[in-house]
Image: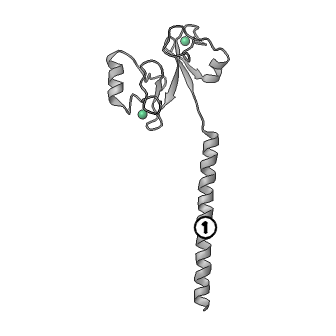
Amino acid sequence: MSGSDSSLVKKAAIAAAAVAAVGMLFWSWNSNMAQAPVEIGYYCLTCKKSDHISVYQANWRQYPGAMSDSVLYCVHCDKGPAHPTNECEKCGAVFILHLFPKYDEFGSPACPKCDAAYGQAAKAKGVHLMPKALNP
Ligand SMILES: [Zn+2]
Ligand SMILES: [Zn+2]
């Protein structure tokens, strides 16, 4: 009788551990969601300087005739255009948005490194979507 008792305790312990594990998973997932660091940067095509979006938010001047209203005058050289940049979730490459746009069915910008055909098409037009300054 004592044998089956201890196995019952074991089963209960395993069940408790499983619940705790799921709880931890959920907790870490939740905290990840809350933090979600959206590090949007800006890159100036003229002076090739990049900066955090907060610097631009304080000095938001839309660049006329650009593909998007989030293309701005540069805060450094005052010329621009300064384009927002995006970091690829898959390969980590940083590339420029609204310069040679292509988006997937979810509206996410295509990565010129992962989507080689897109990268080639941009290159063929002389558009550098992944400047060295952004990908050291
Ligand atoms: Zn500039
Ligand atoms: Zn990529």
- Kind of element beneath mark 1: helix
Residue farthest toward the bottom in the current orientation of the protein: 1
Residue pictured at 65% horizontal, 19% vertical = 57
Looking at numbered disc 1 in the image, what kind of residue is underneath it? Ala
Task: Where is residue 100? Give x, y as percent.
Answer: 41, 19
How is the rendered protein coloured? Answer: one colour
**Residue 124 appears anywhere in the view:** yes
Examine the image and state in which quarter residue 39 appears: top right
Q: From the Cβ of disc 1, is ligand 2 less than 8 Å away? A: no
Residue 49 located left or right of residue 126: right
Task: Where is residue 27? Give x, y as percent.
Answer: 64, 52
- Is 31 placed above or below 99 here? below
Residue pictured at 62% horizontal, 57% vertical = 24
Instruction: Classify the position of the N terminus by image quarter.
Output: bottom right
In the image, ligand 1 is in what quadrant? top right
Examine the image and state in which quarter residue 113 appears: top left
Task: Where is residue 53? Give x, y as percent.
Answer: 61, 23
Residue pictured at 43% horizontal, 32% vertical = 105
Residue 103 located left or right of residue 15: left
- Is 13 placed above or below 45 here? below
Total labels: the figure holds: 1
Examine the image and state in which quarter residue 10 appears: bottom right
**Residue 135 appears anywhere in the view:** no
Task: Where is residue 129? Give x, y as percent.
Answer: 42, 22
Residue pictured at 41% horizontal, 25% vertical = 102
Residue farthest toward the right in the current orientation of the protein: 58
Residue of label 1: 17
Label 1: how many Cα within 10 Å (few below 14, some 14–19, many 20+): few
